[in-house]
Image (spheres, helix red, strand yellow):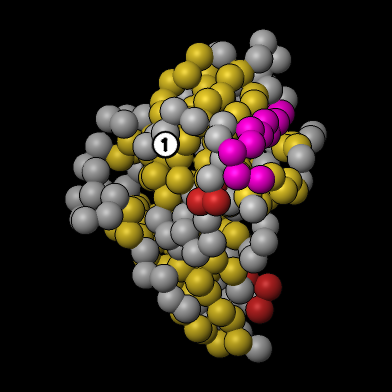
Amino acid sequence: DAGVTQSPTHLIKTRGQQVTLRCSPISGHKSVSWYQQVLGQGPQFIFQYYEKEERGRGNFPDRFSARQFPNYSSELNVNALLLGDSALYLCASSLARTGDEQYFGPGTRLTVT
Amino acid sequence: QKEVEQNSGPLSVPEGAIASLNCTYSDRGSQSFFWYRQYSGKSPELIMFIYSNGDKEDGRFTAQLNKASQYVSLLIRDSQPSDSATYLCAVWSSGTYKYIFGTGTRLKVLA
């Protein structure tokens, strides 16, 4: 079975631009979570979606938004990019929303110049 | 106090030795505990999860959970150079419905 997939792998954007990252969960998984990981730190929780509804949100500004589609895939949008948004963006899928094991995709490396 | 704390390391152990990685957490409502391995430039890979007090073994890995003391540990037996990576501890709480990660411990296994 395919694991979690993410696209694109790498992305270079300019300050002020907008970016959309995509994630497809493991087949049968209904929950998708998004994380931001900067060098030397653990992943920081951004959003969790379950059954197409936002179920949790971390301490990130409103420039960050996400949605989940009927097929459980998800998009993360970041508006008005800042240099500090440069990071590895990780998507993780799990069966449900209540503390199940999460499996990560390969990530999208975003560089903001 | 950080929600999930790990010693950043590096923790250096000789090949064949037991590596012991520790993690403490602050939320007593935490219910699920995970260990991930992350190689440089790669995404985290789930290696162990534990939900109940005590030990859970899987191959060379043993996770230990003590909810009263609010710590979880990972033992790696017969450490190999390929085990050299950053190990992330993650905790899920029903109070916050969030997975909180520590900053990770860097492990070096010396050949």
Residue in front for this viewpoint, A40 or B14: A40
Q: Quadrant of residue B5?
A: bottom left
Q: Secondary structure at mark 1?
A: loop
Q: Can you give x and y, in whole percent of width and height, for residue A94 in the image?
A: 57, 30
Q: Amino acid at mark 1?
A: Phe
Q: Which residue is mark 1?
A: A60
- Name which residue lies at 42% across and 34% down: A61
Q: Is residue A40 left or right of residue A18?
A: left
Res. A98 visible in picture: no
Residue in front for this viewpoint, B106 or B15: B106
Residue in front for this viewpoint, B57 or A97: A97
Res. A63 visible in picture: yes
The span picked out in magenta is: A14-25
Residue A87 vertical position relative to residue A90 in the rendered view, above or below: below
Q: Can you give x and y, in whole percent of width and height, for residue A83 in the image?
A: 55, 51
Q: Can you give x and y, in whole percent of width and height, for residue A4 in the image?
A: 70, 36
Instruction: Based on the picture, tell me whether residue A59 belongs to the magenta stretch.
Output: no
Q: Can you give x and y, in whole percent of width and height, for residue A50 in the image?
A: 52, 19
- Name which residue lies at 64% across and 64% down: B39
Instruction: Based on the picture, tell me whether residue A18 belongs to the magenta stretch.
Output: yes
